[in-house]
Image (tube, rainbow, N blue to C red):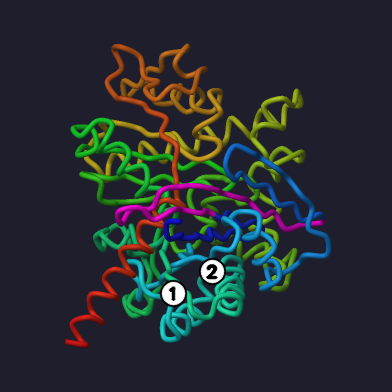
Amino acid sequence: MSAIAVTFNTGSSSLKIGVFGIEAGRARPSARGTLKIGEETRFTYEAGESAQETELPNVRHVEPGVISEILSRLLPQGSQPAVIGHRIVHGGLQFTGPVLMDSDAQTRIEQLVSLAPLHLPPALEIIRAVRAKYPDVPQTASFDTAFHSSQCSLATRLAIPREMHDAGIRRYGFHGLSYMSVSEKLRKLDPDLGCGRVVCAHLGNGASLCGMVDGVSVDTSMGFSALDGVPMATRPGSIDAGAVIHLLRTEFHDADRLEDFLYHRCGLLGVSGVSGDVRALIEDFHPAAREALDLFCFRVAGEIGRLAVSLGGVDAIVFTAGVGEHQPEVRNGVARHLAWMGLDLNESANKANATVISGRHSAITALVIPTNEEQVIADEALTVINRHRTIEKHRAS
C-alpha cells in the first residue's frame, strides 16, 4: 500500500477533501469528497468507481469525530495519512508560499483572522481537529494569496496613506491555488500560450479574474478581501465605499450585520431576488434573473478589459471553476462584450464545453480548463515535507 496524502480545501460553509496516493514522490488522486454544512449536513464522496451521498446529522462544526467519519469512507481500510495539506485563504504579508503547519505557523495564521473572518476560523477549526485525530501526522498550509505576491506595488497599492499600506491594508488577490493549477495545465496544453498574456476567469460561487504573463500573476480583480472585484453568487464585488458607509449609518448600525449582508445577501442573489446559483437563473424567466446574469457577464468582461491594460494585451482567456467550466451561456455573454477585442467563440465548441472554444478567426484564444486546487495542495504538501526532511537531515549530520 502506497503512502497517502490528504487535502482539506475549506470554504466558509463547505469542505472539499482529496485523497492521493504517493507514488515515486508524486501525488496521484484516488478519492474525493465534499462536506456541505447547513440545515442538513451532506457528505458526497467518490472512492474507486462509486459515488455516494450521506447525511451527517447534528453536525455544525468539524470535530475529530467528523474527520474520522469522512476519512473512514475515503481512506483504504486500516490506513492513515502520511501528510495532510490545507488550503488557507489568506496569508497576509507573512506567507508567500506553502509552509509546515507547526505551532508558530498556526499562531501567525490565527493573527490574520481579522483579514478573512469567514474563511480562516473554519480552516483553523479543521487544523485543530486533524491534529487531535492524527497528532503525529505532519500538516502543511497552502495559501490562496501567495500566488499574487509577485505583483508590483502599482497593482497592490490602495490610494491610502503609505503607513496603512505598509501595515497590510492593500490588495492581496485570492483563488491563487486555482490560478496555479490552470497555469500549469495551460503550459502543458500549449507552452506558447502558457508563456503569453493570459486572463484566467475563475467563475464559481466566488469569482475573480487574474492577469498572468509567463504564468506569473500581474494583476487580479479581488483586492483586500474576497468581497472585491466582479459580482458573485451572494457577494457584490466592487462597491463604492461611500455606499458602504451609507448602509452602515442608515440600515445596519453594526459592522457584523453589514458584513453578513455583503457576504450573503448581495451579488446575483441580491439583484435577482431569486437565487445566487447561475444554473437556477438561466432557467428562470423573470426579468430580474436575466438582469443578474447580464450584469455578471458585463462586469466580468469589463474586468478582462481592465486586466488587458495591466498585461499590455491579451493572448488567451481561460474560463475555469463551476460556472466557467460548465455554463456556455455565461461564456457567450462575456464574449459578446469583448467582440471589439477580436474575441469570437465557436458556438458548437462552446456548447460542448470543449477545451478550445474560440473561433477560427478569433484574435484571442479562449479555453475552458478545469481547475484542481486539491492537486496543488497535495503537490505543495509533498514539497514542504521533502524540504523539511532535507533540512532535518542536514541538521542531524
Task: Residue 285: name its quadrant.
Answer: top right
In this image, 315 relative to 45: left or right? left
Name the residue that disc number 1 marks. 138
User: From the viewer's perspective, is the residue at label 2 or at label 1 nearer?
Assistant: 1
Of 83 and 212, nearer the camera is 83
Q: Residue 50 appears at what percent x and percent y?
A: 64, 39
- In the picture, measured across the screen, residue 51 lies left or right of residue 392, that is right
Q: Is residue 394 visible?
A: yes
- Provide residue 311's location: percent of width, then percent of height: 24, 42
What number is the disc on residue 116? 2
Question: Which quadrant holds the N terminus?
Answer: bottom left
Precedes in sequence: disc 2 or disc 1: 2
Is disc 1 surrounded by few (<14), some (14 to 19) or many (20+) residues within 10 Å? Answer: some
Magenta segment: 18-39
Of the pair 248 and 391, the residue shown nearer to us: 391
Question: Overall secondary structure of the magenta stretch?
Answer: strand
The three-letter code of the residue at mark 2 reads Ala
Q: Is residue 23 magenta?
A: yes
Depth check, front residue: 34 or 352: 34
Q: Is residue 381 above or below residue 277?
A: below
Q: Residue at x 36, y 36 (%)?
A: 305
Task: Measuring from the top left, give residue 91's x and y in whole percent.
Answer: 41, 70
Callout 1: SS: loop
Quarter location, residue 368: top left
- Please tell me which residue is depicted at 55% across the width and 53% down the height of the picture: 239
* Label 2, label 1: how far apart the Cα atoms are: 24 Å
Q: From the viewer's perspective, is residue 147 above or below residue 301?
A: below
13 displayed left or right of 226: right
